[in-house]
Image: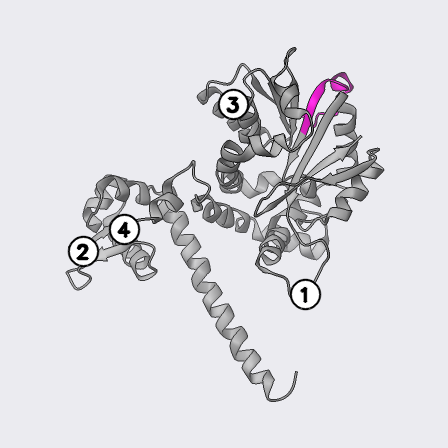
Amino acid sequence: MTATTAPAASTALAERIFNASIATMEIASIYLGDRLGLYEALAELGEATPGQLAVRAGAHERYVREWLEQQAASALLTVDAPDAAPDARRYRVPEGHAETLLDRDSLNYMAPLAQLTVGVLGPLPALLRAYREGGGVPYSEYGADTRQGIAFLNRPMFLNQLGGWLAALPGLDARLRASPAARVADLACGTGWSSIAIARAYPDALVEGFDVDAASIEEARANAAAEGLADRASFHVQDASDPALAGRYDLVTIFEAVHDMARPVEALATVRRLLAEGGSALVADERVAERFAAPGDELERFNYGWSILHCLAVGMADSPSAGTGTCMRPDTLRGYAVEAGFADVEVLPVEHDFWRFYRLVP
């Protein structure tokens, strides 16, 4: 960097950090609006003054007024007659924004991303300690916002797209529809939406979700019951390594979790043991670049952000740990799978903005 470019670069970085701080606070404002039910209440009212919205949402009027002004200043909401008295201004959710902020079934639903972002910032003191001393931060310490943020963010993908993902595996669709009923093991199932989506897509299949996080499994059971699928989607607080489960499943899945695992080779060896003769194993994980490069694109920056704040620390919470991190390259997964006893890993022809899909070849 030359003497003439250094000041310009410094100014550009200062502006970048300033703009990032605005974006961070806007994420927090979306979190407030979502968690307090302000967006939902405003959409139900159509338009409202601060007082009307406060009554409808059960919130304090002065805080609601300040939040509404910030939302309008940030172009997240619109306001009629901005020159009117503060308590007389009328606000609404603009056309097109309701889907992103409120429609839980839409692939454009992004409010959970705000909840997840706030959630991963919660245990920063513990994360600082891990950076200094080693070790990690257990998943449970990230709390309900992280757990539910992940669940609500991934839920629309599972419910809208999972059937297409499974159809990419040769012969699997037919087996999941055949008799006797196919058995599916969904490892690291979280709050169960992947398991529920499989059960919904294949009415004859029996799906078992496994996770070591008790709070996630409790929510998974409640979600399955609410969907009327508790008879075909069951959930267990365990790591699925029980020898009694060996050779039992026609499909074993792991969605967005291998990179979080302390011992991924052992986990994939468990997948191999669970498979019945002719069974299929599917792993979906982040669609990161195949090789490290700097600077990275937006998706690479996005994934490294989760890695430094959450995924690496969760994976390092147990010892020994592979210390994979979010940016697990295809060759890394292939190495884990081969060491676990699989012959190879095939990248499936599934188009997706955020995930890459792998078939583990027995």
Q: As displayed, is residue 89 above or below residue 196?
A: below
SS under mark 1: loop
248 part of magenta stretch: yes
The earlier-in-sequence mark between 4 and 2 is: 4
**Type of residue at label 1?**
Ala
- The residue singled out by tag 4 in the image is 64
Q: Nearer the viewer, mark 2 or mark 1?
A: 1
Q: Which residues are magenta?
A: 236-252
Of 143 and 256, the residue lying toward us: 256
The earlier-in-sequence mark between 4 and 3 is: 4
- The residue singled out by tag 3 in the image is 200
- The residue singled out by tag 1 in the image is 294
Q: Quadrant of residue 195?
A: top right
Residue 320 seen anywhere in this rendered image of the structure: no
SS under mark 2: loop
- The residue singled out by tag 2 in the image is 89
Q: Quadrant of residue 270?
A: top right
